């Protein structure tokens, strides 16, 4: 429970070293918002001593990354697939999430781990957990494309939704998503400084390393490779 009287799920800096996983969480949230994906409200949270003292050896000297709890959601799992209400918005949502994850190289939302919530009030998917973007927080090497098994497209959830995409609507849906994907480049100049300004100094990360990694996402060749790979994986999992 925080000072705004809302509850948050928190991830915190576990040692005196650099908190690159938290940088991934923060960056993923900002980028997901730029894509207009549904995501819990985020906040940087100072956890008071008396709230964490029971954890004994853990010292929370730096702000935690917090995701506001949404009371109207349920976890997406295998049983959930039978209850899902297929809509045109949901078809586009699952595809946008898959493309987004390819773009940010998120290795933790895949066939075996949805990392999604479902909002029962809005009948929409909510994306969570971005600590494994940039190929699981790899800042020392260039971005690399996900394999098909590392994407949500080959999950039971995606296949349940994708089989409802009819041949005559497929091209229209893909065109819409491509237009949104291309338009993200226009936000680069504003997004990167905004993300960098919000990274706490006591996360002890190298700003130049982080800025350089985020800039890689907007490289034209990388974006083209992500789109081509997305279409390939989509076609292989679509049963139209």
Image (spheres, rainbow, N blue to C red):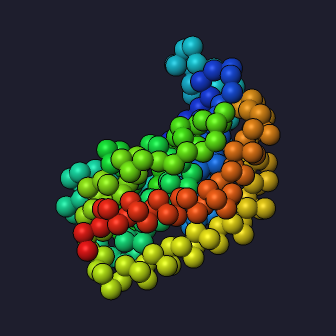
Camera-nearest residue between 102 and 76? 102
Q: Is residue 93 visible?
A: yes
Which residue is drawn at the image coordinates 28% and 80% (left, top)?
A: 166
Residue at image coords 60%, 45%: 143
Residue situated furthest top in the rendering: 57
Q: What percent of the width, then of the height, locates residue 233?
A: 38, 60
Write the residue at 72% across / 41% down: 210
Q: Is 113 situated left or right of 38 in this image?
A: left
- Residue 66 position, x and y percent, is 58, 43
The N terminus, quarter of image = top right
Count of all numbered marks drawn on residues in the image: 0
Image quarter in which the C terminus is found: bottom left
User: Quick check: 183 above or below 154?
Assistant: below
At 60% from the left and 61% from the top, the residue drawn is: 223
| Residue 151 horizontal/vertical position (percent) | 40, 51
Residue 200, picture quadrant: top right
Residue 206: quarter of image: top right
Left or right: 168, with 64 as reference point: left
Q: Is residue 107 above or below residue 48?
A: below
The front one of 146 and 9 is 146
Furthest residue toward bottom: 168
Residue 29 point in image, percent of width and height: 59, 52
The quadrant where residue 188 appears: bottom right
**Res 4 visible:** no
- Is 179 located above or below residue 62 in the figure? below
């Amino acid at each position: 429970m925080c000072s705004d009287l809302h509850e948050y799920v928190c991830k915190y800096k576990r040692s005196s070293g650099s908190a690159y996983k938290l940088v991934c969480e923060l960056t993923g949230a900002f980028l997901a918002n730029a894509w207009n994906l549904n995501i819990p409200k985020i906040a940087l949270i100072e956890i008071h001593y008396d709230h964490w003292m029971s954890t004994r050896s853990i010292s929370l000297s730096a702000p935690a990354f917090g995701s506001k709890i949404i009371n109207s959601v349920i976890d997406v799992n295998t049983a959930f697939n039978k209850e899902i209400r297929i809509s045109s918005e949901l078809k586009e949502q699952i595809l946008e999430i898959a493309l987004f994850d390819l773009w940010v190289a998120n290795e933790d939302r895949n066939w075996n781990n949805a990392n999604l919530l479902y909002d029962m009030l809005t009948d929409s998917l909510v994306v969570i957990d971005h600590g494994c973007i940039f190929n699981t927080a790899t800042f020392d090497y260039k971005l690399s494309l996900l394999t098909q098994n590392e994407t949500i497209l080959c999950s039971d959830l995606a296949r349940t939704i994708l089989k409802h995409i009819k041949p005559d609507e497929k091209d229209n849906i893909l065109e819409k998503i491509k237009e949104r994907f291309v338009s993200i480049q226009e936000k680069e100049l504003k997004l990167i400084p905004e993300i960098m300004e919000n990274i706490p100094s006591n996360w002890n990360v190298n700003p130049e390393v982080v800025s350089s990694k985020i800039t890689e996402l907007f490289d034209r060749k990388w974006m083209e490779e992500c789109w081509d790979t997305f279409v390939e994986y989509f076609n292989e999992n679509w049963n139209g």
